[in-house]
Image (cartoon, rainbow, N blue to C red):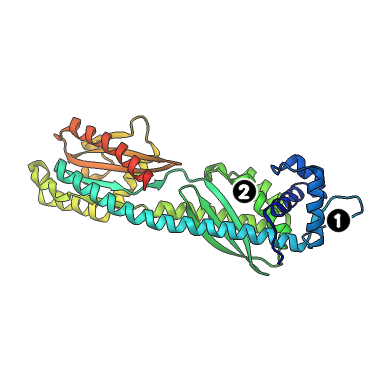
């Protein structure tokens, strides 16, 4: 494929994007008005003539504007796919690196907190509380398969191969990409309602099944993130230091709760969903939603990394714990932790 200089690339992109939006042949005056090229109509006409000669655009009628050729669509799609593939690859590498650093940091934090307070401590890794769509990329794999890549805020990535009965040409694939991204970007799952789904399917026409499968991928991404909550704990045996908590059966049940973590995950989800104000909550005795902690006090704090990404720090000890000291420590730690993790 012929190499294009930067100016020709921008003009070709502008022609294709304008044609995808309007379905009308695109003239030089339209490009000069609607693009950021800052070029005269005469210069754009010259460049368009070169693009036509190279086979990237065609003139359907005399005196009409230009429309993309198959070669033009192919250039556009290849560049678009390369950009998105690189973005997805960069995101994955960054998240792997961040995850490794984060796990090490959180394990250290929860251990130090347990040693300093002499109570049991827990901390959850940052997770999405209200995930929204960042972008969707549909790419042709072969005549009967399309790769759907859904990226959510927090850079969660989900890939899915969609089977299609008939091959999709470049123009229809681009229109579906634009339809999905224009309508879904920034929306949470709860905002993707029946009315929006119906509208998307209607606009997709015979390709409505592809829309349905992309929306399923969005839902699967949320489900995977909810099920993947990581919780780190430390200091469970500190409860033996307090006679009122040292009963062997109760202590055994408490430690089992800390090791299995299912009830802790449920508690953290409830805390983050209902978090308000300072982000600090205190459960005393029977107020605790976890049966094995009814003889304890549980103090939690939510740290916030923005974009709906949150985590929870918790300290569990006797009802006679030093509440002021615990809350002061949690208040400082949640702010410090938020700042550190944002820099990671």
Q: Residues within 10 Å of mark 1 (few under 14, many from 20)?
A: some
Q: Measured from the top left, where is residue 71 in percent x and y?
A: 75, 63
Horizontal side of 288 relative to 198 (left or right) equals left
> From where the camera sits, is residue 248 visible?
yes
Q: Nearer the viewer, residue 201 or 45?
A: 45
The residue shown at (67%, 60%) is: 77
Horizontal side of 257 relative to 196 (left or right) equals left
Q: Measured from the top left, where is residue 244 in percent x and y?
A: 10, 41
> From where the camera sits, is residue 295 visible?
no
Q: Nearer the viewer, residue 48 or 235?
A: 48
Height in image: 291 above or below 83?
Answer: above
Q: Measured from the top left, where is residue 261 in percent x and y?
A: 28, 53
Horizontal side of 197 relative to 217 (left or right) equals right
Q: Which mark is residue 59?
A: 1
User: Marks 1 and 2, Cα distance to the nearest angstrom?
Assistant: 29 Å
Q: Which mark is residue 181?
A: 2
Q: Nearer the viewer, mark 1 or mark 2?
A: 1
Q: Disc 1, disc 2: CB below 8 Å? A: no
Q: Measured from the top left, where is residue 26 in percent x and y?
A: 81, 48
Height in image: 163 above or below 174?
Answer: below
Report helix, strand or loop for mark 2. helix
The residue shown at (44%, 41%) is: 308
């Amino acid at each position: 494929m012929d190499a294009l200089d930067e100016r020709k690339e921008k003009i070709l992109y502008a022609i294709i994007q304008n044609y995808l939006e309007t379905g009308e042949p695109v003239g030089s005056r339209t490009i000069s008005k609607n693009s950021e090229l800052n070029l005269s109509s005469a210069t754009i006409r010259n460049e368009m003539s070169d693009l036509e000669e190279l086979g990237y655009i065609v003139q359907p009628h005399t005196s009409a504007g230009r429309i993309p050729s198959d070669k033009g669509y192919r250039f556009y799609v290849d560049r678009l796919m390369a950009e998105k593939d690189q973005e997805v690859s960069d995101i994955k590498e960054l998240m792997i690196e961040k995850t490794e650093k984060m796990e090490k940091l959180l394990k250290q934090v929860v251990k130090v907190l347990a040693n300093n307070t002499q109570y049991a401590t827990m901390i959850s890794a940052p997770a999405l509380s209200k995930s929204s769509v960042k972008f969707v990329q549909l790419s042709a794999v072969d005549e009967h398969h399309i790769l759907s890549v859904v990226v959510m805020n927090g850079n969660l990535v989900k890939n899915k191969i969609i089977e299609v009965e008939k091959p999709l040409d470049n123009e229809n694939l681009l229109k579906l990409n634009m339809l999905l991204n224009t309508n879904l970007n920034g929306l949470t799952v709860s905002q993707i309602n029946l009315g929006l789904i119906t509208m998307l399917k209607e606009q997709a026409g015979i390709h409505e099944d592809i829309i349905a499968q992309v929306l399923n991928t969005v839902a699967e991404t949320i489900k995977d993130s909810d099920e993947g909550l990581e919780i780190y704990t430390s200091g469970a045996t500190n409860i033996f230091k307090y006679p009122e908590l040292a009963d062997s059966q109760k202590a055994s049940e408490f430690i089992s709760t800390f090791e299995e973590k299912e009830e802790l995950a449920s508690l953290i989800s409830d805390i983050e969903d209902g978090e308000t104000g300072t982000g600090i909550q205190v459960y005393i005795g029977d107020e605790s939603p976890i049966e094995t902690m009814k003889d304890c006090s549980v103090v939690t704090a939510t740290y916030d990394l923005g974009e709906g990404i949150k985590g929870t720090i918790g300290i569990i000890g006797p009802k006679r714990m030093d509440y002021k000291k615990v809350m002061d420590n949690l208040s400082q730690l949640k702010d410090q932790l938020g700042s550190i993790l944002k820099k990671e």
